[in-house]
Structure formats: C-alpha cells, structure tokens
Amino acid sequence: MVKREGKSKEAKVIAMKSREPAAAGRFYPGTKASLEETLSSLISRDESREKVLGAISPHAGYMYSGPVAGRVFSRLAPRDLFVIIGPNHTGDGKPFSVYPRGQWKTPLGPAEVDEEFSGYLIDNSGLLQADEAAHAYEHSIEVQLPFLQYGGWAFKFAALCVANMKIGDLKKAGHEVANAISKLKKDATIIASSDMTHYEKYESAKTKDRQVINAILELDEDLLLEKVSELNISMCGVAPVIIALSAAKALGAREAELIDYKTSGDTSGDYSSVVGYGGMIIK
C-alpha cells in the first residue's frame, strides 16, 4: 500500500495492483490474437483522424456495437490523455468515482492511468472521489480501451464512473474535468460511453434516439435530459454524455457530428426488440 499526498482523504491510501479485465471474453474477445483480428475489421485505416474535444461511443458487446464504436475511434487522432466517462451499471462504489492510479489490463496489454490528472480531479473536486469499487466489474469504460490500444499510441487515460442524474452536479463535474485539462495543459479527448434506447421495437428506438442525437448535435445538456425524461428513453449513459458535453463546451466546443447510428437488430436481424448505438464526435 502507498500513500498519496493531497487534500482528499479518499486519495490517501490506494492499492497499486493492476485492475484485471472484467469484460474480456464476454463483451469482446478474450485473447490478444482474436481481439486484434476483431479490431482490424472494425477500425478503418482510411478515415481522416481529428484531435476532437469529445466523443460518444457505445459499450455493448463488440458483435453489436463494435461497428459504431469502430467508426468513432477511426476518427480520433492520438492524444496524450483520454478521459473516459462511463455509467455505473453495478451500483457499487461512489456516485462520482475516479480510478486513482495504476494500470488496467486488457488482452492487448496494460493501459496506464494518468495519476497526475486523476489526482488533480480528486484533490480539487467537490464531487469526484477516489474509488476502485465502482470500476471493479464495470464494463462501460473497459470496452473502450482496446480501441485505443490497437492504434499503438503512447497514451494515458482517466476513468470516471458516474451514478448521479442531477443536472447541476453533472454540469459541475464537466467543468471540473475541463478545468483539470486546462490547468494541467493536457492534450486530451473526453469519451462518453453510452448506449441509447434499450429493448424497444426498432421504429420506436430510432425515433427516440433521434431526439437524443439532435440534443447532442445542439450541444444542449438540458434538452438532452429533458428529452430522456419526457420520452422515457432508456439511455444508460446520459450522465456521462452530459458531463462530456459540459466539459467540451467549457473547452471551446462549437459543434458535434453524428458518425454512425445502428441498432442490435442490424446484427441479429430481430427488429422487435433492439438496443440503439450512436457514435458522435464533439469539436
């Protein structure tokens, strides 16, 4: 065990062991060879890459959401830091959980947490806290890492797992992320991990998800939450997307672009009950 200096009591004592993969062999292939083969079919070498402020990528099994995620990551340029924000599906841990330090393992090898950035968030936020429990079995952040690792880039990442739906808190967290990026002069892209409508008929899902996409294209966090609530849209990552939008806007974002939209029905052929997957970039 090691001690970390800082204002936050939560950051004082932190285990240094690497996080073992929780989703390998389930959400994506569990061996290096099979994972590389899958990623080679999902990531295009022909796309023009951009240093964008933010991105939205789905987190279902690669069989279903991988084509959309692959198109998003095909557009992302190398960065020193990727801030990956995911929803908390397990209910474990703190509502605004930052994985503080160490490495996350995938079949492609270890990915290193940016301790400086994560520590700054922990020490200077009224919301974000050091916590490993929320991340232990959560897949929404982990499934994004192989797409970044496959590029062969030297990068670090920060992992934020969120279980809070208060718009004021989410906007505040977004501004805190943006402030940390600015203060530390990080070359960074923020990735919000989210699927869209869950288990509805294709036409219903497509109609609802269009409302979500339009709100994001307008860079309007309030409209996004309003539509999700009004239409009862089962978008699991609305909180991470609100944080990413708020952070990107604070960093100067002016527009968003829809990269792709598909549903699980495009893979399974069953359009009677689908999950929606949207991929977007914010620049």
Image: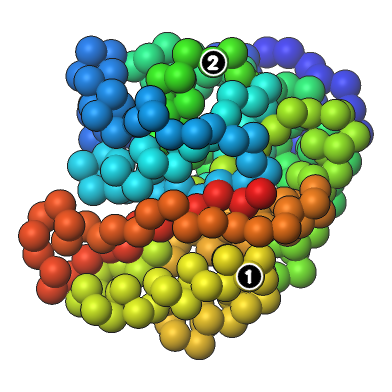
Image height of 156 relative to 11, above or below: above
Residue 166 appears left or right of 237: right
Image height of 156 relative to 84, above or below: above
In the rendered image, which residue does mark 1 sit on?
218
Q: Residue 40: horizontal and vertical position, in percent?
A: 28, 24
Q: Residue 274: horizontal and vertical position, in percent?
A: 22, 66
Q: Residue 146 carries which label?
A: none
Q: What element carries label 2?
A: loop
Mark 1 and mark 2: Cα distance apart in space? 31 Å
For label 2, the crowd category at 10 Å Cα-Cα, with few meaning under 14, some 14 to 19 and many 20 or more, is few
Question: Of 239 and 276, which appears nearest the observer?
Answer: 276
Q: Is mark 1 on a helix, strand or loop?
A: loop
Q: How many discs appear?
A: 2
Residue 271 appears left or right of 37: left
For label 1, the crowd category at 10 Å Cα-Cα, with few meaning under 14, some 14 to 19 and many 20 or more, is some
Question: Of 273 and 153, which appears nearest the observer?
Answer: 153
Protein image colouring? rainbow
Mark in the foreground, 1 or 2: 1
Q: At 73% across and 42% down in the image, what residue appears?
A: 129
In the rendered image, which residue does mark 2 sit on?
153
For the N terminus, the quadrant is top right
